[in-house]
Image (tube, rainbow, N blue to C red):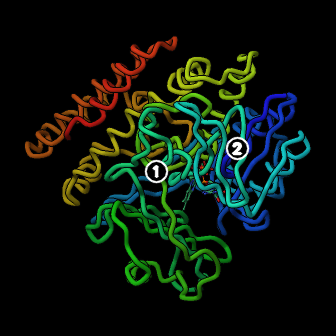
Amino acid sequence: MKKIVVAGGGHGGIAAASLLARAGYDVTVYEKNAEENMGYDWTDIFAPGALKTAGFPPVPEEKYTYKDNMTFYGPGFRTALRQDIPADKLEIKMERRDIYAHIISAARTNGAKFEFNCGVLGPMMLGNRVVGIKTENGEVYADLVIDACGIDSPVKKGLPAVCGVNGETGKNNRFYVYRAFYNRTGEGEVKDKYKVCLFSEGKLGIGWIATEEEYTDVLIGRFEPFDLEEAKRTTDYYRESNPSIGTELKRGGSFVSIPVRQPLSRLVCDGYAAIGDSAYMTVPIIGSGIANSFKAAKMLFNVIKKDSGGAYSQDTLWDYQVKYYKELGAGFAVLACVKEALTVLTPDEADYLFDSGVINAKDMSIDADSTDIMKIVSGNEPNDIKKKVTGVVKDSVLFKKMLPVGKKITAVASVTAAMPKRYSKTAVDKWVSAYEKAISMKI
Ligand SMILES: Cc1cc2nc3c(=O)[nH]c(=O)nc-3n(C[C@H](O)[C@H](O)[C@H](O)COP(=O)(O)OP(=O)(O)OC[C@H]3O[C@@H](n4cnc5c(N)ncnc54)[C@H](O)[C@@H]3O)c2cc1C
């Protein structure tokens, strides 16, 4: 029986383990945390359909609620853009710990094994091939290693250059996040239950204030690291205009990172496949990655199953990359360019985009299923694109800044469309360097 190791208990890794174990593979997940400490002490939003895609049973109704529409504010807090997501597209909100409990239980029922409290240290190599992982409890050999260790995966980082998996996250591609739940005071009227502020205080990043019955969920995200003092100062700043945010820390209160970039240029090498945050599968402008990881697990499972000889080489695993980019990755690579464009805006320019209607409420109705920039804006008024172009052209400085964005999007979209459908070392090496060149175009 083929032995498959999942390094790290990321969502996609557990989903792949569950599908593979059900199909008769010998699969073990190696996770550094204890089972009861899996996940973060907060809620997440995701499309429930992805659970079904990954073969998980539906979540009991009492375990989730539906996400509220968000209201977006520009830096000057002048224009509010409120999402209006149709009822049939609403995502669910669920405790991360409950998501983990649900998927771990289902994976176990399917026969997947778990080794908790077992940190993974890096890959084991034999020539160019990954043949297992080094863990705190010793070496583990495997026919295939699925890397679900998240953004800072020691497996990905430990791969030698010959594998061609570029594990550098890169500047402005990591979102540093502080998230905390404070008690909710009875003060002040809460107009927008779920408020998202771009560039608050002129700092490159976002903040959200989500007011729940019992608490207020505060998130502060930046492209540069910041410390607890700064997080507290920013929360105090939010309190001035949102007096419902109390000072008693109820839950969370920690720092984490979210990848916000294009997917890895190479998701696979001999004996190795990356999934979830280790492969940068989040939607680059909103940071959602749970549903994408579940969807990717199904794609990876199908490719592994098809490789009846169990070679698990770049050649046989390449189909996973092709499928992922076709369904999700190519769209995310373009959205990564849009995210990059946002990082070069000044707060005044961001306000202009909000106030002039270049960005409107429909554009903000993005969810984890929004993979294509054209689909995101195509639901708008017929002359919306014209309005956007006219709005940008009117501001000559902004127009000059945005010109290279258009060029870069075209280059990235063309290169992803030209990804080799079948593996050949020469063709794939050539494609990877063309993709990385397009991605590194300056905005
Ligand atoms: C504040 C915040 C809010 C978010 N909100 C949402 C949301 O609402 N919706 C959404 O879809 N996504 C959200 N995301 C993104 C989402 O968390 C990820 O994209 C998604 O979980 C996929 O990542 P992952 O599971 O692959 O990686 P991770 O969540 O990073 O999981 C990696 C796992 O590997 C383990 N691990 C790491 N290193 C080692 C090691 N050396 N040895 C053994 N085990 C290891 C970790 O303990 C962890 O269990 C959010 C992220 C953050 C930080």
In the image, is residue 162 above or below residue 178? above
In the image, is residue 186 above or below residue 284? below
Is the residue indicated by label 1 positioned so its CB lies within 8 Å of ligand 1?
A: yes
Q: Residue at x 65, y 24 (%)?
A: 312
The answer to whether one can see residue 88 in this image is: no
- Distance of label 2 from label 1 (alpha carbons): 20 Å
Q: Residue at x 50, y 47 (%)?
A: 158
Q: Which residue is mark 1?
A: 259
Q: Secondary structure at mark 1?
A: strand
Amino acid, disc 2: Val
Percent from the top left, x then y, of residue 36?
Answer: 79, 67
Crowding at mark 1 (Cα within 10 Å: few <14, some 14-19, many 20+): many
Residue 165: which numbered mark, if any?
Answer: none
N-terminal of the pair, mark 2 or mark 1, is 2
Percent from the top left, x then y, of residue 409?
Answer: 29, 30
Residue 82 located left or right of residue 272: left
Percent from the top left, x then y, of residue 258?
Answer: 49, 55
Residue 6: which numbered mark, if any?
Answer: 2
Amino acid, disc 1: Pro
The answer to whether one can see residue 398 in this image is: yes
Q: Quadrant of the N terminus?
A: top right
Residue 231 located left or right of residue 9: left
Towards the viewer: 85 or 367: 367
Q: Residue at x 66, y 28 (%)?
A: 300
Q: Quadrant of ligand 1?
A: bottom right
